[in-house]
Image: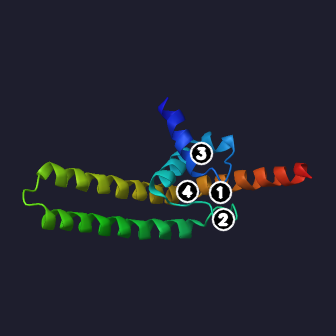
Amino acid sequence: MNDNKNIIKISDYYKDYDLPKECFNSQSLKNLLELSALNNVILIDKNKKVKSKKNIISDCKKLKKVKLKELTKELKDINITETDISISYVRDTNNKYIKGIENIDNIIKIINRNDSDINYLERILTDNNEFIEKYSN
């Protein structure tokens, strides 16, 4: 059941790309797609081509910096506005951002571990587009 929810999240995020079912056969690729959807890391460009490994990692590093700035701003705002600071609120805020940063790190790890997921995704999307082009005429 949880797996179906994850596939729905992935499909919703990538609805403009019409991902083929083969994307969900590989657990590693499915994890990569899910993490990218949760963290708004775009793996596929506007031309329905998979971005390069270097560009994806660069986007992830930029996103990590943004998340860290958001965390420090939110903690600073808590310190300024709250007179009685609850440690549980600070801990929850911290954990929320840490989980997001860990997810971004996991995207980088999956991509760095091997190129097969990115290559597989690119092949699936290319094969799917060729099929549509050939038989739609």
Amino acid marked by disc 4: Asn
| Left or right: residue 1 compared with residue 70 | right
Badge 4 marks a residue whose secondary structure is: loop
Q: Position of residue 81 (x, y in %)?
A: 15, 64
Label 1 – label 2 distance at C-alpha:
18 Å
**Above/below status of 19 relative to 75:** above
Q: Are marks 1 and 3 in contact (CB under 8 Å)?
A: no
Residue 11 bears which disc, if any? 3
Amino acid marked by disc 1: Asn
Write down the residue under mark 1: 119
Write down the residue under mark 2: 46
Q: Position of residue 77 (x, y in %)?
A: 20, 66
Write down the residue under mark 4: 114
Q: Give the mark nearer the N terminus: 1 vs 4.
A: 4
Q: Give the mark nearer the N terminus: 4 vs 2.
A: 2
Q: Position of residue 83 (x, y in %)?
A: 7, 60
Q: Give the mark nearer the N terminus: 1 vs 2.
A: 2
Q: Which residue in the rendered view is the most extreme toward the top?
A: 1
65 or 82: nearer the viewer: 82
> Label 3: how many residues lie within 10 Å, few (<14), some (14-19) or many (20+)?
some
**Above/below status of 114 relative to 46:** above
Q: Position of residue 44 (x, y in %)?
A: 62, 60
Q: Give the mark nearer the N terminus: 2 vs 3.
A: 3
Residue 53 bears which disc, if any? none
Badge 1 marks a residue whose secondary structure is: helix
